[in-house]
Amino acid sequence: MKKERGLRFVSLFSIFCLSFFIFVACDGSVFYDESRRVDEQGWLPEESVDFDVTVDDTNRIFNFLVEVRNSISYPYSNTFLFIRTTFPDGSMAQDTLEYPLADPSGRWYGKRTGRYVDTRYYFRRNALFPMEGTYRFSLSNGMRDSAIAGLRDIGFRIEYSNMK
């Protein structure tokens, strides 16, 4: 009887854990989230990382984020990125972004896992898409060096805003 009760507890506990992980993994606030690998030995300025996003609701408010994964051997405390947005009608806009990756003492701001650090920054908050269609967000190296070593992945994320 005691062994049977223990097995029942283990089964219920397993179901609870599985349900919890499925619930946590299904983040309803995410509209788009993709990441692309860049050449860790040297990401060249002319090598853009492109993200195509199809939008059919121009009434929703979104937050736009850039995700950077760098190795702990990345030689700088920040990074500069150029982001070019191509709208469905072919018009374009370009921004220059500076993201701090470490404080002045060299302590990384992001979450460190092994030899990599993941950092996420807002690019735009509480913004609307002005038209329906497919948008292309192209991110490229904006540092003065011709190639930046130590960056591994660049990601682009769009979340639904809580703002009504």
Image (cartoon, grey):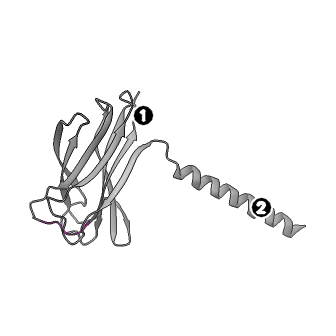
Q: Residue at x 54, y 51 (%)?
A: 24
Residue 108 drawn at (x, y percent): 29, 63
Q: Name the spot of residue 131 as percent of width and height, x first.
A: 30, 30
Residue visible at 42% across and 34% down in the picture = 162
Q: Secondary structure at mark 2?
A: helix
Q: Position of residue 39 (x, y in %)?
A: 24, 68
* Extreme-right residue of the structure: 1
Q: Nearer the viewer, residue 143 or 133?
A: 133
* Above or below 133: residue 46: below
Q: Nearer the viewer, residue 51 or 9?
A: 51
Residue with the mark numbered 2:
9
Part of the protein shown in magenta:
147-151
Q: Nearer the viewer, residue 111 or 80?
A: 80
Compared with 144, 29 (above or below) is: above
51 is within the stretch colored magenta: no
Spatial CA span between label 1 and label 2: 38 Å
Q: Quadrant of residue 135?
A: top left
Query: Label 2 near label 1: C-beta < 8 Å?
Result: no
Residue 140 in percent (x, y) is at 19, 55
Instruction: Identify the residue at horizontal 10%, vertical 64% (top origin).
Output: 145
Q: How many marks?
A: 2
Q: Amino acid at mark 2?
A: Phe
Provide the secondary structure element on which disc 1 rests: loop
Please say if 157 is above or below 150: above
| Residue 104 occupies quadrant | bottom left
Magenta span: predominant SS is loop
Closer to the N terminus: mark 1 or mark 2?
Answer: 2
Q: Which residue is mark 1?
A: 162
Residue 148 located within the stretch drawn in magenta: yes
Check the image and report above or below for 43 versus 82: below
Which quadrant holds the N terminus?
bottom right
